[in-house]
Image (spheres, coloured by chain):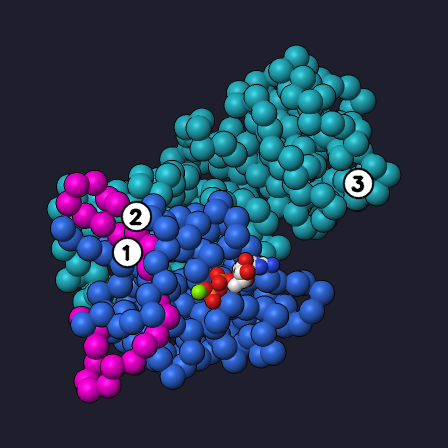
Amino acid sequence: MIEHKILFTGTVGAGKTTAIQAVSEIPTVCTDVISSDLTIGKKMTTVALDYGEVSLGQSERLRLYGTPGQARFSFMWDVLAKGALGLIILVDHTHPDPLKDLNLYLQHFARLIKETACVVAISKMDKSRPPPLQEFIGLLHKNHMANPVIAADVRDKEQVLWILDLLLAQMEVRV
Amino acid sequence: MPDMPDKDRISLSYTAVSCADKEAVLLKSVFALYGLRGNINWQYQNSMGADFVIIGTEMSSSSVDLLLRTRIGAKQAVLWISDASLVSDKTRHVFRCKPPLHPSHFANELKQVELFFRGGARHDPSRSPSLPPSSSASLSPQIAALREEFPDNFYVRLMSWPSPELLSDDRFLWRLSAMLSARSMTVAELAERSSKPEDVCREFLRRLSDAGCLKKIPQEDHREPLPSSALRETKTTAEGGLSGLFRKIRVSLGLSS
Ligand SMILES: Nc1nc2c(ncn2[C@@H]2O[C@H](COP(=O)(O)OP(=O)(O)O)[C@@H](O)[C@H]2O)c(=O)[nH]1
Ligand SMILES: [Mg+2]
């Protein structure tokens, strides 16, 4: 079985579990224990990790991972990022400083973003409160990135599929 | 402003039905502007037989459906100001604007409508469009200018994601932008990848360029990006390698390709 993966990242409450659930063929698994292949170094840490699946015929499978949100688990992000086909960053617009949240992920995943594909989805977007979408776009631009930035309600499956569509559009031109 | 040569200017009629007062005023002013600088001479006509029929927000979806099936011919273009989805019709050329109508959205659609009447670019991907070859002498000045601005051998690359206003809710424009965010491409390649005529792509590139989102790279300055190691190392059993894998993912998710 060949396995591929797409990563969902974002702060706690940004909608990772919801988004993965929307498209996964299996009920989303929220693991609390690191499996052995994810163990890094000495310490065994418990983290929350979302996992969903889409089967791709007999011999292949697409895994959807939701990274633990907190920056203290960032060592996990690198493990998960290895070999990923693309990244979806979910930004909770109701957070105190959503631009700072986004910046953290842009920095940390810079290489994955530049080498594969990335969509930034702003969840719980309320247009009447700052920052406007344009500022998120501006932040990407400052990081020399022009990836899609979209306001989305990930409770709606169609919107999650649209995010994945834009992610695939980027992957497709890279081969 | 010098007048356009007469042979390049065509006269077309438009009509507007079921428009709210605000919409009617906006339409009138945009047409007045276009009458001055476009290469189509738009004349108002109080009849459903007009070349271009604009349907305002005050008509219900079912009436629009009926109208399209019974009153609109295949050579007419329609613009419907609505969020609603169309139920039945695939044979008429229906352009869309979201309410509340915005002058720039309408102007953008009008450009597409003009391309449609220029005998070329079609709005609907299900109809295969045919444009005159690049060397054609009978090109409209607009298209000729676009071809000059975005020559076949230039690469373009997105420098910044476009605003939602620029993309409106046209999925084709979103996909095109996503492609251009990943890598620089020539107009020809963009057209092939998106299955759209080159001139339709150019028209959009022009808007991206106006918005400061685009970088043009002459062929001699272009460097092929290194293939990403992440994707290079991806193994798949899919026929056609990675392209096949992405196709498989689309099919499994129920996405169109
Ligand atoms: N209003 C709104 N609520 C959302 C959106 N996305 C997720 N939620 C809700 O936010 C809560 C947290 O979502 P969850 O998927 O658990 O976030 P996670 O911590 O990133 O996995 C849930 O109650 C979701 O229903 C959105 O776009 N809009
Ligand atoms: Mg979660």
Label 2 neighbour load within 10 Å: few <14, some 14-19, many 20+:
some
Q: Position of residue B165 (x, y in %)?
A: 62, 55
Q: Position of residue A97 (x, y in %)?
A: 58, 79
Q: Which residue is mark 1?
A: A63
Q: Are marks 2 and 1 on the same chain?
A: yes
In the rendered structure, find residue A54 and report the number of the disc placed on it. Answer: 2
Q: Secondary structure at mark 2?
A: strand
Residue A41 magenta-highlighted? yes
Chain drawn cyan in the picture: B
- Left or right placement of residue B182 versus residue B144 in this view: left
User: Mark 2, mark 3: which one is toward the viewer?
Assistant: 2
User: Mark 3, mark 1: which one is toward the viewer?
Assistant: 1
| A151, B104: nearer the viewer | A151
Is residue A131 among the parts visible in the rendering?
yes
Chain drawn blue in the picture: A
In this rendering, the count of numbered labels is 3
**Quarter holding ligand 2:** bottom left
Q: Are marks 2 and 3 on the same chain?
A: no
Report if the beta carbon of the residue with label 1 is closer than 8 angstroms to ligand 2: no
Residue at (33, 48) in percent of width and height: A26
Which residue reaches farthest right? B21
Residue extent of the magenta highlight: A37-63
Q: Position of residue B150 (x, y in %)?
A: 43, 53
* Amino acid carrying mark 2 in the image: Val
* Amino acid carrying mark 1 in the image: Arg
Is residue B154 among the parts visible in the rendering?
no
Residue at (76, 35) in percent of width and height: B57
